[in-house]
């Protein structure tokens, strides 16, 4: 790859490969088949202590083939797209399909549900970026953090990455569509020291269009400010208190909900939300909806990984669970219909109040503001929740001091029920878009 990244994908050629694989699958005797083919290329750079540290150019490709022999299936993946390698992969998938157990829920998505409308969602914005320019932007970002305050004593580095990809999905129903997308990210992580104590924090932005990427000077300064405000952190005494999750960590609470309402967890009875469809989980004011057709958004797509047409839909409506998260296979296991979420959600929005973060603090009065979560202490089967955390203690509606080395615990069912308000400080840097979330009370483990 040349030093100047100028991506271009031969979309028609990739679709031709997918069609050719399907034709070969039919010749083998497959009753149906599907192909997923992806090509991506990108550039990433890292700098640290005002010096370049790493430059990576990447180009990846991969193809997955699933062949069906009635209700038996075999799947094989390969990175070699030569004709001989494809023949070998097809033969292997067909051999697997002869011997696997028959599964009544296996098979392609219903042809009537496949997408037929493919609007331009404006998510493909390749960045012709040289490694020199990328390094300069990352160095500028880190320098802004160092220049922000003499308390910034060290750096874990600044990183810039840009990636462009083309994905093709085709199946024997006659569906053969491609989608192109790009993602660009700039981040900085630094360390501050005062009175013998050190703290780290970071800032980042991720966008589909590089024109929307904030200046590195802003991201670097924000990383420094976030780090400095954590200095002189204390521990809390063990007890119960109200908790506000900052927007960028609050999305994990919604991620746990998605895990619990996913078809795979539900049909295996491995979720604390089994048989809760139609029941209230949140206060009545809460709505959680999917909007897959937003322009320039990271999660936008007109079809899922099975070719099923995506749609605007609710998962939580007036606090009630109104949809599970399903692909075709899990839907059949549950005797339901796919929700076009075989590959997850596409732009999930959590409703917010009119309160900004400061207004949430004022309304809460006293409690914990969590800005970082540590560990993976969440049990989706029982809903039990326990995570290490750090953040700030709030008194009289104002930040009193930073806190660290604490644990917050509860049960997700209780936490969702006891949600008081969601701030309007929407964090849209990911596929789950939410503001800060205020929970009425949780157990805090400290001294």
Image: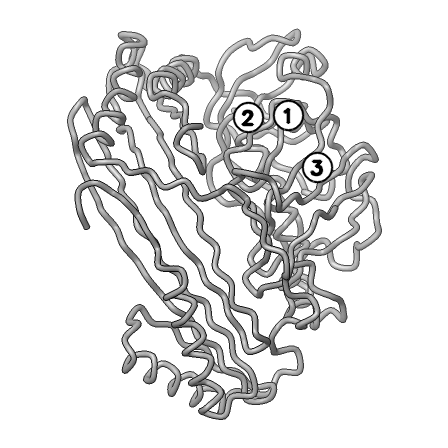
Query: Would you name the residue on which mark 1 appears?
Result: 243
Q: Which mark is residue 201?
A: none
In the displayed structure, would residue 226 be above or below residue 41?
above
In the displayed structure, would residue 8 be above or below residue 249?
below
Distance in Å between CA atoms under marks 3 and 1: 10 Å
In the displayed structure, would residue 357 be above or below residue 28?
above
Residue at 70% across, 37% down: 415
Q: Return the x and y of residue 231 as percentages of the image width and height.
A: 39, 14
* Sequence-first disc among 1 and 2: 1
Other residues around mark 1 within 10 Å, as few (<14) / some (14–19) / many (≥20): many
Residue 262 occupies which quadrant of the picture? bottom right
Residue at 79% across, 59% down: 275
| Image position of 395 (left or right of 180) | right
Query: Would you name the residue on which mark 2 appears?
Result: 370
Mark 1 secondary-structure assignment: strand
Residue at 55% across, 42% down: 431
Distance in Å between CA atoms under marks 2 and 3: 15 Å
| Image position of 349 (left or right of 81) | right
């Amino acid at each position: 790859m040349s030093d100047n990244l100028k991506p271009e994908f031969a979309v028609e050629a990739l679709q031709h490969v997918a069609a050719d694989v399907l034709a070969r699958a039919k010749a083998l005797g497959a009753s149906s088949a599907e192909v997923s083919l992806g090509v991506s290329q990108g550039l990433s750079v890292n700098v640290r202590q005002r010096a370049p540290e790493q430059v990576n150019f990447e180009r990846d490709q991969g193809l997955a083939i699933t062949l069906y022999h009635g209700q038996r299936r075999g799947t094989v993946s390969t990175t070699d797209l030569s004709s001989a390698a494809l023949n070998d992969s097809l033969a292997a998938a067909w051999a697997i399909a002869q011997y696997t157990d028959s599964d009544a829920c296996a098979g392609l998505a219903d042809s009537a549900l496949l997408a037929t409308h493919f609007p331009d969602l404006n998510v493909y914005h390749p960045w012709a970026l040289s490694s020199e320019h990328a390094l300069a932007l990352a160095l500028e970002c880190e320098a802004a953090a160092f220049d922000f305050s003499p308390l910034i004593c060290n750096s874990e580095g600044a990183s810039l990455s840009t990636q462009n990809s083309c994905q093709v999905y085709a199946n024997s129903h006659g569906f053969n569509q491609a989608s192109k997308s790009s993602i660009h990210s700039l981040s900085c992580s630094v360390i501050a020291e005062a009175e013998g104590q050190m703290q780290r924090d970071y800032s980042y932005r991720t966008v589909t269009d590089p024109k929307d990427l904030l200046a590195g000077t802003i991201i670097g300064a924000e990383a420094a400010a976030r780090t400095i405000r954590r200095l002189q952190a204390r521990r809390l005494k063990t007890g119960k208190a109200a908790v506000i999750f900052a927007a960028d960590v609050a999305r994990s609470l919604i991620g746990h909900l998605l895990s619990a309402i996913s078809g795979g967890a539900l049909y295996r009875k491995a979720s604390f939300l089994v048989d809760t469809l139609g029941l209230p989980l949140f206060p009545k004011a809460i709505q959680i909806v999917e909007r897959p057709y937003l322009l320039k958004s990271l999660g936008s797509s007109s079809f899922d990984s099975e070719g099923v047409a995506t749609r605007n839909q609710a998962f939580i409506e007036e606090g009630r669970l109104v949809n599970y998260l399903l692909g075709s296979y899990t839907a059949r296991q549950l005797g339901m219909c796919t929700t076009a979420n075989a590959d997850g959600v596409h732009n999930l929005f959590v409703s917010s109040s009119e309160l900004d973060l400061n207004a949430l603090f004022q309304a809460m009065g006293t409690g914990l503001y969590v800005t970082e979560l540590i560990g993976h202490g969440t049990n989706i089967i029982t809903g039990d929740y326990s995570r290490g955390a750090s953040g700030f203690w709030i008194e009289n509606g104002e930040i009193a001091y930073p806190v660290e080395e604490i644990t917050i615990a509860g049960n997700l069912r209780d936490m969702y029920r006891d949600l008081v308000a969601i701030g309007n400080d929407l964090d849209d840097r990911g596929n789950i878009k939410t503001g800060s979330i205020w929970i009425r009370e949780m157990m805090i483990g400290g001294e």
